[in-house]
Image (tube, rainbow, N blue to C red):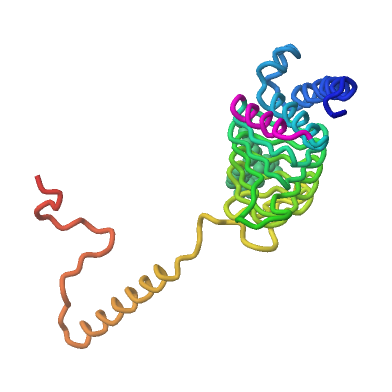
Amino acid sequence: MSLYSLPVAKDLISRTLVGMKSHIAAARGRDPATANASSLEILLTWPGVQAILAYRLACRLRRSGVPLLPFAVSYVSRAVTGIEIHPDAKIGPGIFIDHGSGVVIGETAEIGENVTLYQGVTLGGTGFQSGKRHPTIEDNVTIGSGAKLLGPITVGHGAKIGANTVVVEDVPPRSTVVGNPGHPVKVDGRKLTDGPDADWIHLPDPLQDAVKSLSARIKELEQQVAELSGDPGPDREEPGGEPKKGRSSAGG
Ligand SMILES: CC(C)(COP(=O)(O)OP(=O)(O)OC[C@H]1O[C@@H](n2cnc3c(N)ncnc32)[C@H](O)[C@@H]1OP(=O)(O)O)[C@@H](O)C(=O)NCCC(=O)NCCS
């Protein structure tokens, strides 16, 4: 079988060596920690670089129709780096995975050029459906640590996904998306002031509002009854006043 012939093996090795240089360059461009590290140190100890090199090898073996070996390469790479990349995923040049551990890139995921992923990023599916079920990430996207991108969504070029964001819908180009569910807070470097309210912390509480309004109404009615009857009414504790003295419910 020609797959195992010497020229094929030589081609694989030479492409892998060329890939090494570009992946080390990507690490140098985006990880300040590489400043004092030699290329050999990066190659031997940067899991993100190792995982991508292993993926490139697995991908080529798979496209050449070699059985078993592509998955074996992925499996070993995952055990060593903590990064799981399916050999059928499509990944463009210039990708950099920083730290790496816990990154999962699914079978039908597509990643453009110069994309940066931090640890714990998942490019996953939402269920058991087949076909295209993983995200498409366009060029120059940065995805923060712990972010989960689920389903066949598209993240537009130049977008930034905040750490721990959960994204289940398309992301506009050049936007910043944060939160769960992920929502845009910036587009083209400008904060969004129009559109949906981005304050997910101070949410309205209709129940609390209704109780407050009823409480105020009861107080008003009590005052009116007291005025009509000349009776000062029950001795009520005002909210925020001194707590009533008595046995502590804490026991002891
Ligand atoms: C999203 C991120 C890329 C910043 O993008 P940016 O376009 O510069 O956005 P800003 O910093 O101006 O933040 C915009 C708003 O989103 C908020 N925000 C930023 N990141 C957030 C996050 N991960 N989760 C929730 N809110 C976030 C900011 O507080 C700010 O809110 P405000 O408008 O109320 O002040 C960055 O915050 C981030 O999460 N980077 C990932 C870094 C990472 O994973 N590092 C791991 C190193 S090991």
Q: Nearer the viewer, residue 96 or 5?
A: 5
Q: Which quadrant, please, contains the C terminus?
A: top left
Indicate left or right for 2 with 26 as reference: right
Q: In this picture, is 216 found above or below 242? A: below
Residue at point 66%, 30% (across, down): 72
Q: Nearer the viewer, residue 104 or 224?
A: 104
Using the rendered image of the protein, determine whether residue 116 is visible from the camera's viewpoint: yes
**For residue 51, which quarter of the picture?**
top right
- Residue 230 position in % (x across, y down): 16, 84
Residue at point 59%, 55% (across, down): 181
**For residue 84, which quarter of the picture?**
top right
Residue 68 falls within the magenta-colored stretch: yes
Indicate left or right for 189 with 8 as reference: left
* Residue located farthest toward the front when viewing the structure as drawn: 1
Residue 171 falls within the magenta-colored stretch: no
Q: Which quadrant, please, contains the N terminus?
A: top right
Which quarter holds ligand 1?
Answer: top right
Q: Which residues are magenta?
A: 66-80
- Residue 119 position in % (x across, y down): 61, 34
Q: In this picture, is 183 found above or below 138? A: below
- Residue 177 position in % (x across, y down): 67, 49
Residue at point 73%, 29% (across, down): 52
Using the rendered image of the protein, determine whether residue 153 is visible from the camera's viewpoint: no
- Residue 20 position in % (x across, y down): 80, 21
* Residue located farthest toward the right when viewing the structure as drawn: 7
Q: Nearer the viewer, residue 132 or 242?
A: 132
Majority secondary structure in the magenta region: helix
